[in-house]
Image (cartoon, grey):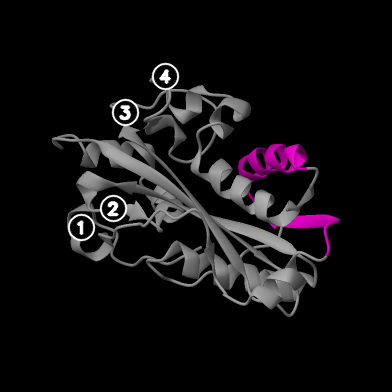
Amino acid sequence: MRKFSELSLTGTRPLLARKAKSRPWRRCARSSEEGGILKGHKTVIHFVTENAGKYAEAVRIATEFGVQLRQLRLRKMEIQSEDLKAIVSFAVRQACQRARRPVVADDSGFFVRALGGFPGPYSSYVYKTIGNSGILRALRSAGQRSAYFQSTVAFCKPSTRPVCFSGIVNGSVSHRPMGTHGFGFDPIFIPKDGDGRTFAEMGTEEKNLLSHRAKAFTKFFEWYTR
């Protein structure tokens, strides 16, 4: 778990304000030769996560591409950073070295614009400490409620550097939690291209048509299987 020592909503705006850049995909390493080595073995990929919901979403996409995705319940080693790519690149490299097999990992953030991007890369810790109700309280007097989710997926094989892919979904924060599906901030996020429901009011297949994680994993599997 990432440590965040000064978690007060009033003091987070200048600290956590950041602008995420949406790109089709991003390499953590630019070597084309190494990229060819990474894609040379296509049997099984292990997804490093202890979150059953994340695995359920990813495995559905993997199946569409004919990829065998297995869950690896290994605690990720994470650095403290404002950059999702830096966080997940470090985590997947460490997991690959420990597992000695091809692995994929993701790191996601919930960015509320009225709060200067908070909670951003600290989303997991913030959810465990103040939850959805804390975000709603912070937005009680906010003039606008726009927000976005971003996910960065990183893939690594032993003796190679990670390759990264990102996905973003724009939307807004609801005025109250709605729905019982999903996890994290899903009950208070309404995707812009949806029908007015929160992620938590959608099943996995519906959510995968819109979500940040589905976009990132789709880009990864497109690259991996081409």
How many numbered tags mark residues here?
4
Q: Reading the chain from its start, which is encountered first: label 4 or label 2? A: 2
Residue receiving disc 3: 174
Q: Dot 1 surroundings within 10 Å: few (below 14), some, or many (20 or more)?
A: some
Sequence-wise first label, 4 or 1: 1
Q: Residue at x 59, y 69 (%)?
A: 91
Left or right: 11, with 77 as reference point: left
**Dots 3 and 4: beta carbons under 8 Å?**
no
C-alpha distance separating marks 2 and 3:
16 Å
Residue 195 bears which disc, if any?
4
What residue is at 73 percent from the left and 53 percent from the top?
Answer: 226
The structure residue drawn at horizontal position 56% and vertical position 62%, both measured from the top left corner, is 164
Q: Nearer the viewer, mark 1 or mark 2?
A: 2
Disc 1 on helix, strand or loop? helix
The residue pinned by badge 2 equals 117
Q: Amino acid at mark 2?
A: Gly
Residue 64 painted magenta? yes
* Sequence-wise first label, 1 or 2: 1
- Disc 3 marks a residue whose amino acid type is Ser
| Spatial separation of the CA atoms under disc 4 and disc 1 | 30 Å
Label 4 amino acid? Answer: Asp
Instruction: Residue 196: say if magenta.
Output: no
Residue at the spot of label 1? 13
